[in-house]
């Protein structure tokens, strides 16, 4: 039987190549050893556990789901198989039906060759790969297969989830202003199953595709915009008719505008977001709290601060009204709600919030090693220490009157540096970008 390798135990979750790193044996071992370990550590209660399991649409998910459940049922647990779901769908199931533990088999935004496991407690706290590293010997000890003690059930919860999203977003109040929109939706089957219910209920025009339409062809279609969802349904992108993607922090500005009269007046931002977003939040008297990027950090910050909204530039949006967690479909419905209240084009709305500032999409630099990344960050910090205010909440952030940038190591690929840069004008942007790239390349 294959063992669990340390390299798949990552900062946020468990992730690797199928079947090289993660396969049926690994899934079985995880199921077999996980619940007794979490009970022993006081993370789960000492009673018969109720666990919900689901998967994304990857072909590998079916065999992994079967073996994960078989491993779990060697213990005295009750396992519900929810079938094909998204990660936010899992959050809903855990909280709404009071499951002790929830697991989704997913490779998130990575390509089809990857897969993995996201594991959450009843409080939606992630059981990360990093946490499980110290128990690697426990997971890889010899296995004794006995009689199945657990119980397995299957249930489809899509109708209940769609109703919850519609009720929480209150989108039905704005039907008259959104039914004239012609929307192209690019999403996996797991998200489409939910959106089909919402489309029927709201009677809105949605066309579904499973691969993005090329930029050169998008303008020829009669859609108002395209909305794109990632593989596990927690990340959303809005693409304009001309093929331009609305940056994640700009979309976040739409949400702040939408919630400007709501309370509590607290918003969580990541350090990659442009300064225009903080300025907008403060204009509406929001208290701004910065968090390290990543769903586990953001959910913790949302709960701790009882925040109304959380914005990650990467396309994750966290909502008080969605268990302080991120949901791409809920964010999509809130975007429709925003459009229903505004009588301007997307291009005009973007200019309204960003003005003349130059904001770049995230730029990645691949280096030879993690150590090289750390050396470069130190050099850039020294270079810019007299040019602006520095914080190190998440990587290196430098703010001045004319520019703002964040440079950080990727949490999933440590030899990659990610740069997000904003400047007041084109000349400043080019100068700062040139300085940073020269230091990285040398």
Image: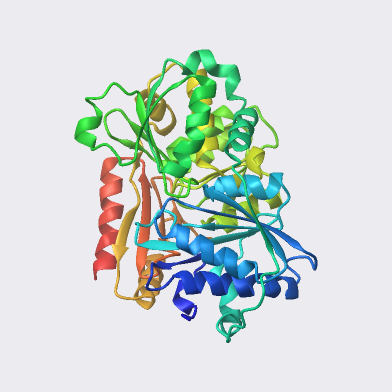
Asked if 334 appears above or below 51 in the picture, the reply is: above
Residue 438 placement: quadrant: bottom left
Q: Where, quadrant-wise, is the C terminus in this rendering?
A: bottom left
**Residue at left offset 53%, top offset 49%:** 83
User: Camera-side residue: 123 or 195?
Assistant: 195
Task: Report x, y in % for residue 211.
Answer: 30, 42
Extreme-left residue of the structure: 216
Q: How is the image coloured?
A: rainbow
Which sits in the foreground, 408 or 85? 85
Residue 341 visible in the snapshot: yes
Q: Is residue 385 visible?
A: no
Residue 104, by quadrant, is bottom right
Q: Tell me residue 100's x, y (percent).
A: 71, 58
Locate residue 182, reporting x and y percent. Answer: 37, 21
Horizontal side of 132 relative to 412 (left or right) equals: right
In the image, residue 214 sits, relative to residue 1, either above or below, namely: above
Q: Residue at x 61, y 37 (%)?
A: 161
The residue at the point 62 percent across, 46 percent down is 155
């Amino acid at each position: 039987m294959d063992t669990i390798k340390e390299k798949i135990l990552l900062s946020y979750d468990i992730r690797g190549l199928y079947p090289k790193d993660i396969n049926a044996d690994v899934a079985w071992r995880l199921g077999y050893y996980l619940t007794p370990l979490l009970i022993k550590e006081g993370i789960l209660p000492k009673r018969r556990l109720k666990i919900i399991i689901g998967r994304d649409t990857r072909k590998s998910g079916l065999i992994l789901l079967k073996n994960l459940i078989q491993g779990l049922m060697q213990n005295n647990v009750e396992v519900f198989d929810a079938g094909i779901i998204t990660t936010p769908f899992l959050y809903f199931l855990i909280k709404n039906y009071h499951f002790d533990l929830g697991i989704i088999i997913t490779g998130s935004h990575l390509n089809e060759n990857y897969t993995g496991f996201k594991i959450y407690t009843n409080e939606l706290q992630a059981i990360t790969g990093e946490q499980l590293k110290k128990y690697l010997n426990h997971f890889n000890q010899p296995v004794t297969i006995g009689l199945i003690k657990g119980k397995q059930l299957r249930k489809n919860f899509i109708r209940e989830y769609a109703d919850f999203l519609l009720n929480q977003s209150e989108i039905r109040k704005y039907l008259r202003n959104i039914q004239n929109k012609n929307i192209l939706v690019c999403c996996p089957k797991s998200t489409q199953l939910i959106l089909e219910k919402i489309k029927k209920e709201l009677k809105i025009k949605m066309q579904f595709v499973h691969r993005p339409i090329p930029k050169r062809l998008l303008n020829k279609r009669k859609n108002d915009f395209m909305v794109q969802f990632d593989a596990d349904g927690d990340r959303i992108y809005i693409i304009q008719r001309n093929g331009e993607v609305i940056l994640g922090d700009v979309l976040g500005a739409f949400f702040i505008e939408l919630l400007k009269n709501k309370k509590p007046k607290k918003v969580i931002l990541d350090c990659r977001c442009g300064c225009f977003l903080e300025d907008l939040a403060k204009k509406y008297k929001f208290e701004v709290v910065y968090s390290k990027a990543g769903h586990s950090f953001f959910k913790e910050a949302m709960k701790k601060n009882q925040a109304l909204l959380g914005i990650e530039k990467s396309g994750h949006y966290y909502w008080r009204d969605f268990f302080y967690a991120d949901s791409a479909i809920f964010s999509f419905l809130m975007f429709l709600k925003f459009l229903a209240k505004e009588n301007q084009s997307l291009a005009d709305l973007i200019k309204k919030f960003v003005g003349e500032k130059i904001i770049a999409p995230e730029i990645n630099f691949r280096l030879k090693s993690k150590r090289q990344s750390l050396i470069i960050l130190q050099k850039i910090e020294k270079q810019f220490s007299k040019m602006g205010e520095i914080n190190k909440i998440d990587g290196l952030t430098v703010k001045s009157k004319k520019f703002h940038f964040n440079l950080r190591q990727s949490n999933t690929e440590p030899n990659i540096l990610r740069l997000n840069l904003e400047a007041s004008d084109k000349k400043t942007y080019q100068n700062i970008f040139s300085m940073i790239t020269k230091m990285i390349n040398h």
